[in-house]
């Protein structure tokens, strides 16, 4: 019998290799193109520079996380080409790399949020906070959710989808 007690979530494909790669691709690309790491020159040079700065910031974040005893699967290479194309900003990461980048993205929003309008900042904040909440739930319940956690997961998923819709 189909019931909430025997439903499972393939979170690797649904989240880590699915929705979150698009979410992170768009978010990080916004940071790159909205001037979180400004420099002069033609747009292609500006993007290359910004991605190199983003890569360095991610590396510093990994090191800080490691000192706190939190180990993440690290993205080993980050290039402009890994951000997809206009209209399809899917970040070219592996699933485990994506999970850590959800956490990084939330801290990057706090650091570079000034590049967004207030409304966009709040929408990104909601989208990233709900993704992080979903990730936390999934990590803490590898096999089964308790009924209260099913409700929490459903609430977070709805809020996440609403935030993404607001972002366009």
Image: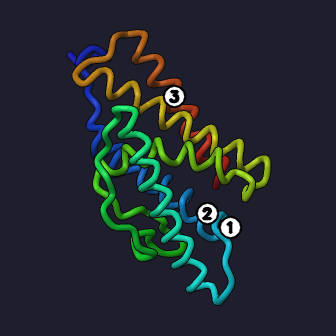
| Real-space Cα separation, disc 3 to disc 1, in angstroms | 28 Å
Q: Position of residue 25 (x, y in %)?
A: 48, 60
Kindly give the residue lying farthest to the right in the view shown.
118
| In this rendering, position of residue 2 left or right of residue 149 | left
Kindly give the residue lying farthest to the front in the view shown.
67
In the rendered structure, find residue 140 and report the number of the disc placed on it. none
Q: Which one is nearer the viewer's eye here, 149 or 34?
A: 34
For the N terminus, give its image quadrant. Answer: top left
Q: Which one is nearer the viewer's eye here, 167 or 141?
A: 141
| In this rendering, position of residue 7 left or right of residue 50 | left
Looking at the image, is 155 positioned above or below residue 40? above
| Real-space Cα separation, disc 3 to disc 2, in angstroms | 24 Å
Residue sitting at 37 percent across and 44 percent down? 99
Q: Where is residue 3 in the image (x, y as percent from the top left)?
A: 28, 16
Q: Which of marks 3 and 1 is nearer the N terminus?
A: 1
Residue sitting at 79 percent across and 48 percent down? 118
**Residue that badge 1 annotates:** 34
Q: Where is residue 55 in the image (x, y as percent from the top left)?
A: 45, 63
Q: Which of marks 3 and 2 is nearer the N terminus?
A: 2
For the C terminus, give its image quadrant. Answer: bottom right
| In this rendering, position of residue 107 left or right of residue 16 | right
**Residue that badge 3 annotates:** 156
Q: Nearer the viewer, mark 3 or mark 2?
A: 2
Residue sitting at 62 percent across and 48 percent down? 109
């Amino acid at each position: 019998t189909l019931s909430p007690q025997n439903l499972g979530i393939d979170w690797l494909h649904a989240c880590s290799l699915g929705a979150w790669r698009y979410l992170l691709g768009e978010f990080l690309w916004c940071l790159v193109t909205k001037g979180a790491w400004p420099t002069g020159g033609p747009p292609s040079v500006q993007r290359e520079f910004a991605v190199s700065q983003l890569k360095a910031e991610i590396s510093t974040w990994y090191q800080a996380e490691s000192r706190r005893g939190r180990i993440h699967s690290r993205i080993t290479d980050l290039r402009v080409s890994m951000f997809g194309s206009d209209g399809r900003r899917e970040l070219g990461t592996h699933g485990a790399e994506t999970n850590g980048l959800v956490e990084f993205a939330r801290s990057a929003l706090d650091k570079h949020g000034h590049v967004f309008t207030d409304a966009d900042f709040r929408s990104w904040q909601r989208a990233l906070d709900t993704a992080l909440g979903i990730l936390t739930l999934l990590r803490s319940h590898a096999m089964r959710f308790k009924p209260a956690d099913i409700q929490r997961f459903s609430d977070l998923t709805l809020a996440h989808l609403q935030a993404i819709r607001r972002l366009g």
